[in-house]
Amino acid sequence: MDLPSFLLCILLEVLAINCQDVAQGRIVGGYAPVPHSIKYIVSIQTTERQHVCGGSLINKYWVITAAHCNVGINKMMIVAGDYSLIIYEGTEQEILPQLLVPHPEYNSTTNNNDIMLIKLKAPVYLNSYISIILLPRQGASILEGRVCRVSGWGYTSPSGGQIPSTLRTVKLPIVSTEKCNSSESFGGLITENMVCAGYSAGGMDACQGDSGGPLVCEGRVYGVVSWGRGCADAQFPGVYTAVSKYRRWIDNTIFSFYSRCNKI
Ligand code: 4AZ
C-alpha cells in the first residue's frame, strides 16, 4: 500500500469503514473481469429487475443455483450475457423459468443440500457472450489448495451496502473440510455436501448477492455460493455446495424431465 492509500485507510479506520474493502476494491477483495469473459454466469432477478442471486448455465435450458435463491417461480427471471446490471449492453438474454427443482432434502437451518435446478421456458442462444460451464463428475473431489474462481454481483464490502453494478470475480484456494470444520472455524457445521474456499487471513470472499453463483475449478463448477459467517472474515472461508455430490441428481432430474414430457 502506498502512502496516500495508507493515509486514506487511517481516515477510513477512524470513520469505522473497513479499509481492506477500499484498498482491494470489491465481490469482497476481487476485481472486475474483462466484460463478458465469464460467459457461464447468469443473474437471477425479480421480475422488477432486482438482482437476487447468481447462477450458472449448464446447458441452454438449465441453470444451477442455490436452493435458498428460490423466491418463487412467478417472481423470477434469468438474465444471461449480463455484465453491468444497470446499463443495457445489448448482449443480455432474459428468460423466464418454466420449472424450479430445489433439492428435495434442502434444509434451510443447516444449509445442507443448498442446490436448485432451473429449467428455462426457452433456450438461451449461445454466442460469444454466453456459454455453458461443465459439471464435475459424481464424487469428484477437489484438492485443498486448488485455486478456483468465484464471481458475482454480490456485496463488495462485508458491511453490505450497495450491490455493485458490474460483475466482480476473485480467485480463492480450496480449504480442506477438516480445517473448515475445526473449532477455530465452523466447528462441525460443514457437511460432506459442502466445500470451503478462502484465505485464512480473510479479505477475499463471496458475499450476500453472490449466492447461487459459480465457484469454478479446473473448468468445472465445483461449488455453488451458499453461506458463510459474514464475508471475508479471517478464519471463516466461504461455504459452497459441493456440486460433485449432486451430479447424479442433476443428470437424473434433467433426464426425467424430458422422459416425462415425451410421454405427454
Ligand atoms: C449470503 O448471505 C452469503 N461469505 C453468501 C456467501 C457468504 C456469506 C453470506 C460467504 O448469501
Image (cartoon, rainbow, N blue to C red):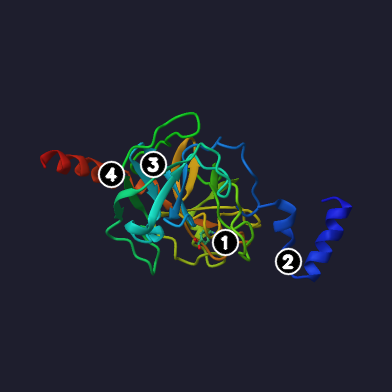
Identify the disc placed on residue 257: none
Report if residue 126 is visible in the image: yes
Rendered location of residue 226, percent (x, y): 46, 57
Which of 189/113 is in front? 113
Q: Quadrant of residue 70?
A: bottom left
Which of 60/171 is in front? 60
Identify the disc placed on residue 17: 2
Spatial CA distance of label 1 from label 3 is 24 Å
Report if residue 136 is visible in the image: no
Identify the disc placed on residue 236: 1
Q: Are the residues flagged by discs 4 and 3 in contact, CB closer than 8 Å?
A: no
Give the mark nearest the N terminus, 4 or 3. Answer: 3
Rendered location of residue 118, percent (x, y): 33, 49
Q: Is mark 4 within 8 Å of ligand 1?
A: no
Q: Is mark 2 within 8 Å of ligand 1?
A: no
Amino acid type for the residue under numbered disc 2: Ile
Q: Is mark 1 within 8 Å of ligand 1?
A: yes
